[in-house]
Image (cartoon, rainbow, N blue to C red):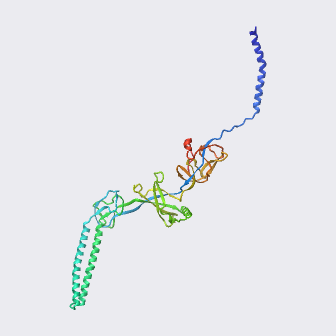
Amino acid sequence: MDVKRHPAVTRTGNSRCAPLLIGSALLLALAACNKENTYVPPPPPKVMVATPVRQPVQRYLEVTGNTAAVNSVDLEARVQGFLDTINYKDGALVKKGTLLFGIQRDQYEAQLDLQKAELAAAQATKANAQIEYQRQTQLGARDFASQRAVDDAKTNLDKANAQISADQANIQLATITLGYTQVTAPFDGVVTRHLVDVGALVGYSGPTKLATIVQVDPIYTYFNVSEQQVLNIKAELARQGRTITDVHNVPVEIGLQTEQGYSYKGTIDYIAPQIDPSTGTLEVRGIFDNKSLALIPGLFVRVRVPLGPPQPGLLVDDTAIGANQLGSYVLVVDNENVVQQRVVKTGPLQGGLRVVESGLQPGDKVVVDGLQRAVPGNKVAPETVAMGGATAAAGTSPSPAKP
C-alpha cells in the first residue's frame, strides 16, 4: 500500500514547488535586464624596447670619386722608319727601361758613323792648324813672319776647334736620334695593346702613337667636396687650431661598388687651392698603394674621410628607424608606457648599429621589435632587451623602410 501512495505524494510536492521556481526565474531575468553591460579593453600589446648604446663614434665625410692613373703616357715614334719589332705582350706589366718597340736603325747608325768620320777629319785639321800656328808664332817672334801670317794661322786653328765642337754636337744629335729607334718604358706600368703592326712605316708625317703605358701602382682617387662641406671642414679645423692646408696626409678610404665597406686605405696628397666657381666644389686627391693591381683607372668608388677624432654618440638598431615625409624617426615609450614618435637625424652604420646624430636621449626606451603594434599615442606593455639583440631574441619581424 505504501508503494501505491508514493507517486501521489510526489506529484503533489512537484505541483507546489513549480510556482516558486518560475517566480525566481522571472526575478533573475528582470534583474539582468536592469544591469548595464561594461566594455573590458584588451591588454596593451607587448613590444620590446632598448636604450641607445652610448659609445665613441667616428664621423666621416662620405662622397663619391673616380680612380686615376698616377702617370699615363702615349708611346710615340719620333723618327721615321719601318717598325721592326714589338717586344712585349699586349697588357703586360713592364719595368722602367724595358724595350717595347724597335724601329729600323740602319739609316740612323750610318748617320752617326758619318758624323764620327767628320769629327775625325776636323781633329786632323785641328792638329795641322795647331802646328802651323806654333810655327808662325815662332817665326813672328824672330821677325821672319808677318803679324798677318800669325793671325791667319790663329784663325785657322780657331776654325778647326769650332768644327770639332760642331761635329761633336752632331754626333750627340745623331746618337739621340738613333736612340729614338728604340721605344722603352719611361716608368713601371701596364702597356696597352699595340696600335701599329710590324712592318708599318711610322713617323713619316709626325709622331706616330704606338701604344700607351699606364702607371697603376700607386693610384690616385679624385673626388669633389661641396662648398658647404668645405666650410664645415674649415670650421672643424679651426676648432682644432688647424687650417685647410694642414690636412695633407689625412687618412682616406675608398670602396668599390661591388664591395661592402671600405677596403682600400690611403692618404690625401693634394687639395685644390680654390673652389671651382662653375661647380661650387673643391677638388681633392688621395693616393693609394695598389701592388695587387686590384684598382684600375676610371673606377667609380665610394670615398670617406674621417672628420676629427671619435666623439661620443648614440646608436640604435637600424631596423628600429622608420621614415615618413618628415624624415627618419624612431618610436619611444615614455614613463606611462605611451608610444611617442621622435624625428631623428641619422648617421652612418657602425658595428651593425645606426648612429643617431640628434633626436634621442641616452635614457630613451626605443621600440626595437613589435613596431606594427606600437601606435603613437597608445599604451603598450614594454619588455626591455639589449640594443642589438632584439631580433635574435624575438625573431625577425617587419620594420619600416629606411630613408
Q: Is residue 235 above or below residue 379?
A: below
Q: x and y percent of residue 59 in the render?
A: 54, 56
Q: x and y percent of residue 276 in the render?
A: 50, 65
User: Which residue appears at 78% of the width and 24% of the height?
Assistant: 23
In the image shown, does 146 or 163 lie closer to the viewer?
Answer: 146
> Where on the picture, by quarter, is residue 110?
bottom left
Q: Is residue 259 above or below residue 96?
A: above
Can residue 111 be seen here? The reply is no
User: Which residue appears at 23% of the width and 90% of the height?
Assistant: 141
Q: Is residue 62 above or below residue 377?
A: below
> Where on the picture, by quarter, is residue 68?
bottom left
Q: Is residue 78 above or below residue 315?
A: below
The answer to whether 43 appears left or right of 166 in the picture is: right
Which quadrant, please, contains the N terminus?
A: top right
Q: x and y percent of residue 392 in the render?
A: 54, 43
Q: x and y percent of residue 100 in the render?
A: 31, 61
In the image shown, does 369 or 204 lie closer to the viewer?
Answer: 369
The answer to whether 8 appears left or right of 95 in the picture is: right
Furthest residue in direction bottom, as rendered? 143
